[in-house]
Amino acid sequence: MVEIQPARVATLKLLADGQWHSGVAMGRSLGLSRAAIWKQVAALRELGMTIFTDRRRGYRLEHLIDLFNADRIRAGLKPTVREAVEVLEVLTVTDSTNCRLTSRPAPPPGRLWVVIADYQTGGRGRRGRRWLSPLGHGICLSVARTFVTTPRELPSLSLVAGVAVADGLAHLGIEEVQLKWPNDVMAAGGKLGGILVEVAGEPGGPLRVVIGIGLNVRPIESLAAALSEERGDAPAAALDQMSGERRLNRSDVVAALLNALHVSLQNFETDGWASMANGWQQRDFLAGRPVVVTRGAETVHGIARGIAEDGALFVDVGGKLTTVVAGDVTLRAGTDVLQSGMTPVRM
């Protein structure tokens, strides 16, 4: 388990306002020598933070940051959600918010255990990909919940979480979010974030699920370039690029996500995927577009045709409706749309 030293957290909190702070004043406030302050600043830089240094003025963050605040998050929760959130752990640095929850017992049914971090040293995406997010610039959120019985449509759980993310962001005025099967959150032609679902339990239940949500909030050009190079099909997008002149507070974003996720998981438990299928269809990033499906050494070209009842992806391949249950899906060049009315087959 990764922890950040208290002195480093205190240094970060002093610099979080984006103003100049002299080394002398910082040392006096924290009870540290100027040399010790320099070491703390160097350590923060290793976490991806840009900190300017001036001999006369001291140290300043490139941008002010809003560190997660547990009280503000709880204040933003609806009463029923506040009651359901049994554990809310706010960390400055950890290895992985998902790992913090998967290493623990399952929460009581219907309750939510939540872990949020300003920075992850080992953030993961689907298929082991890295999740890149400089300290204080994104959302690293994981939620654990227990289902008494295993949902029949369990494979669609990442889609359920995607709809919840879109609903939560819409509550904040971010309406143009789309969802890319199976777990990408898209906006403005780029990747806004992703979802990672991990499950554990008995075949019939109870079943513990951990839903990890990573979102870009502050735009970082170097991050956009890194993701574009790594993914190859979509640059990175950030919430602040879609919020007009508003600068979203990250704690408010977390509260909105938890409000929507709690409702979506309750609906999924009682009514299944059908209760949210329409919400996905309205935001389907791939629908009607030419795609490439890669699974191992196998590559299939076709047209995305929506989502099956169990959450699989329909792809029109040469006049046959293929059901894709796993694989990487990217857009491909071309505008020819094949005709529907095919016989389903399964990959």
Image: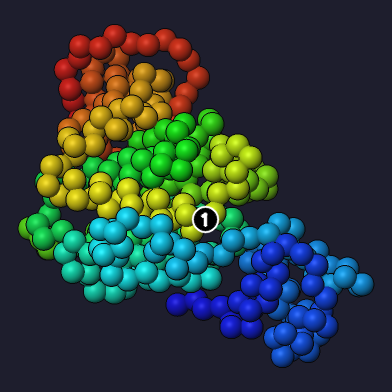
From where the camera sits, is residue 122 visible? no
Residue at screen point 69% across, 64% down: 17
x and y percentages locating residue 244 in the rendered image: 60, 37
Q: Quadrant of the N terminus?
A: bottom left
Residue at screen point 67% across, 66% down: 16
Residue 299 to residue 117: above or below: above
From where the camera sits, is residue 2 visible? yes
Residue 216 to residue 233: above or below: below
In the displayed orientation, state which residue is furthest to the left. 204
Residue at screen point 29% across, 9% down: 339
Residue 264 lies left or right of residue 27; in this view the side is left
Please state which amino acid type lies under the numbered disc 1.
Arg
x and y percentages locating residue 180 in the rendered image: 39, 35
In what element is the residue under mark 1? helix
Relative depth, front residue between 306 and 256 = 256
Residue 334 to residue 249: above or below: above
In the figure, residue 170 lies in which quadrant?
A: top left
How dense is the environment of label 1, judged by Cα within 10 Å: few (below 14), some, or many (20 and up)? many
In the figure, residue 66 lies in which quadrant?
A: bottom right
Residue 180 lies left or right of residue 208; in this view the side is right
x and y percentages locating residue 220 in the rendered image: 65, 48
x and y percentages locating residue 249 in the rendered image: 54, 54
Badge 1 is on which residue? 250
Relative depth, front residue between 17 and 151 = 17
